[in-house]
Image: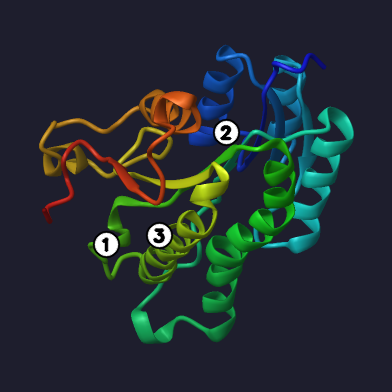
Amino acid sequence: MAETEKVALITGGGRGMGEAIARELYAQGYKLALMSPSESCEKLAAELGGVASRGVAEKAEDIQAIFDLTMKTYGRIDAVVNHTGHPPKGDLLDISDEDWTLGSDMMILSLLRMARLVTPVMLKQGKGAFVNITTFAAYEPSLVFPVSCTYRAAAGAFTKLYSDRYAADNIRMNCILPGFIDSLDHKPGTAEKVPMKRVGQVEEVAKTASFLLSDGAGYITGQNIRVDGGITRHV
């Protein structure tokens, strides 16, 4: 691999926003390593000339596997996109301990485990960048998504702590907080809740991720970037 080529590792990289980010980074010249629960990551990797490993973010062994595959194949990691599915839902106090624990594994420990593996690589390279995909509801919690809101907010706190710790080492970490995006089927009337009167496109999230991973965003770290059509109300 040429020294100038960059490598991106993407979890949840088979469909939806993860797929769109993979395609955008490929267009920007990145080599790709993708992980997803199904064969979708393998099909996309084959199309884009990358490598893939099936797995889920909540399992430490799956994160280890995609990290190992990336390093074995490319020998470096320049960008990481932490993207995962939605945790269990339910009435606030009816959600089981097991489901709360699963949410923590999916959305907090997955970030920590990935950072533990990748940070030494980026320190050796002298730079690197992470983007964590969370949700616009992280700081405006909704009872519709209790587990997600709780742990996505925690992901923002972890992101700030990590960015403070490694900013001087030229390693950045930011969050993207998507609103209602067309990767999901939304209920009728959803678009009317959004000031832009439409749901967002996965490509719009992908363009934002690409920018945050680029040198053009070299002075941006520890931030929560909302890609939500203006639905977030607080100033």
Residue 189 x, y percent position in the rendering: 17, 41
Q: Which of the two residues, 211 or 119, is positioned nearer the viewer here?
A: 119
Helix, strand or loop status at disc 1: loop
Say whether disc 3 or disc 1 marks the residue closer to the N-terminus. Answer: 1
Looking at the figure, which quarter contains the N terminus? top right
Circle 2/circle 3 CB separation < 8 Å: no
Tag in front: 2 or 3 = 3
Q: Nearer the viewer, residue 15 or 212?
A: 212
Q: Which residue is mark 2?
A: 15
Residue type beneath disc 1: Tyr
Q: Earlier in the sequence, mark 1 or mark 2?
A: 2
Residue 15, position in %: x, y? 57, 33
Asked if residue 155 shows in the view, the reply is: yes
| Residue denoted by label 3 | 156
Quadrant in the rendering for residue 125: top right
Query: From this viewpoint, which residue is outermost toward the front?
Result: 168
Q: Position of residue 8 (x, y in %)?
A: 65, 31
Res. 202 visible in picture: no
- Disc 3 crowd, CA 10 A, few/some/many (<14, 14-19, 20+): many
Residue type for callout 2: Arg
Horizontal placement of 1 versus 86: left or right?
A: right
Please give the name of the residue rendered at 65% of the width and 33% of the height, measured from the top-left corner: 78
| 3 and 1 marks in contact (CB < 8 Å) | yes
Mark 3 belongs to which amino acid?
Gly
Spatial separation of the CA atoms under disc 2 and disc 3: 24 Å
Q: Which residue is mark 1?
A: 139
Mark 1 to mark 2: distance in Å? 26 Å
